[in-house]
Image (spheres, helix red, strand yellow):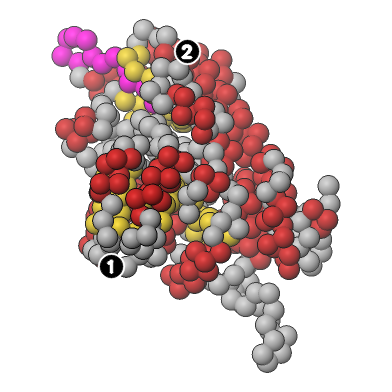
Amino acid sequence: MNHLRLFPGRFAAMESRKRARSLKIETVAVHGGDQHDPGHGAIFPPITTATSFVQPNLGEEGRFAYSRCGNPTRNAYETAIADLEGGCWATATASGMAATALALELLRPGQHILVMRGLYGGTHRLFEKVRSFSMNLHFTFLDLNDVKSVCDQIREDTGMIWVETPTNPLLALVDIPRLVEAVAAARQGKGERILICADNTFATAWNQQPLKMGVDIVMLSASKYIGGHSDMTGGALVTADKTLADRLGALAKSVGAIASPFEAYLALRGMKTLAVRMERHCGNAQRLAEFLSQHPQISEVHYPGLPSHPQHSLCKKQMRTGGAVVTVRLKGASSGGETDLDVMKRFFSKLRIWVLAESLGGVESMINHSATMSHGSMTKEQRAEVGVYDTTLRLSVGIEDVTDLIDDLNEALKS
Ligand SMILES: *Cc1c(COP(=O)(O)O)cnc(C)c1O
């Protein structure tokens, strides 16, 4: 396939966005965006580390001027990720958190935000511990599926709704089209626009495309499935709205929390195999969830792809699969002065393939012990309120052979 023909190059970027929309995501992951190299026709864009770009003459500007404002490698990745999410524009940031922080710059001091309860801990910290002070933003955490309560909570100064679906680690879903519709109806004619942002890190565009369901901005941590190899940190904001793209572009340039050319290269390289990896990740996760739900040592399995998940029918409607993360609760200590944490330590010491690690989305299978890792800053009572116990484990299912993964867990559970 000829890139130059399919995606006719940098001056026709908007045209390429339109073409990409008619292609399947497996094709867009490989060919999306403006990846052509005008210098040598390289099949993969080079890493351009230059800070500055030579201007042809006074008053004549080249395509790029200064790398904070625009860089060829970053541009190749940004246009590709925009196509992948079904947007018209994207900005690549230094991390997922930098992307979220950038989205908040769209607001005025003192504004109000509705937030999905049970979202990623780092986002919770940025909202509650940082921006509530530095920008005096007000956050209301609630279940965004309860649209009656969402509408009741919308205030004159509500400027944003922050969606995360599935949530972390209990994998609750938000019915995106229903939320979008309810917010539009609640706001009709009164007050200013409420921006709906969705963190699509867990699902990825392969599972769901929130922009196509009416969300205004998609936020991503590329450190997870986009990069996919646990070797880079990055984030992105994507939108299909030209006005928002202009505003976010100006903000990205002003704040400067951009992805480096090298990280952009890694993210783009990772993105090319997103579809094949997700297919394996999610297929393995489904098999593993089915196995664990029958296991005598497991008391709870949370996985949207299982019929036992309370939102299984929403999952079938909104997502391609149940995703690649499975959360379980082990049966705890039964007797003899042992604590739940003792039991967990013994379990972890027996694992040979699965690794105990922060993060998710890499090719290798990882387990996160939510109570001491992602939710370590909460008290035991606060954790219990959100359903996280000392025996709760979040499994990021890798792309290894699923029977090896099952055997490894099974051996450790026997102990
Ligand atoms: C990891 C993660 C983030 C933060 O991304 P970083 O790249 O670590 O800054 C945000 N949201 C979700 C759902 C995540 O998993």
Q: Image height check: is 53 above or below 277?
A: below
Magenta span of residues: 327-338
In percent of the image, x 52 and y 27: which residue is there?
A: 316
Residue 227, x across and y down, in percent: 56, 45
| 252 part of magenta stretch | no
Q: In front here: 359 or 19? A: 19
Q: Is residue 330 magenta?
A: yes
The residue pinned by badge 2 equals 291
The residue nearer to you, when weighing 232 against 96, is 96
Residue under numbered circle 1 = 109
Q: Position of residue 275 (x, y in %)?
A: 64, 37
Image coordinates of residue 310 in percent, x first then y, are 38, 23
Q: Amino acid at mark 1?
A: Pro
- For marks 1 and 2, give the one nearer the viewer: 1
From the viewer's perspective, is 36 left or right of 64?
right
Rendered residue at 31%/25% (across/down): 392
* Secondary structure, magenta segment, majority class: loop
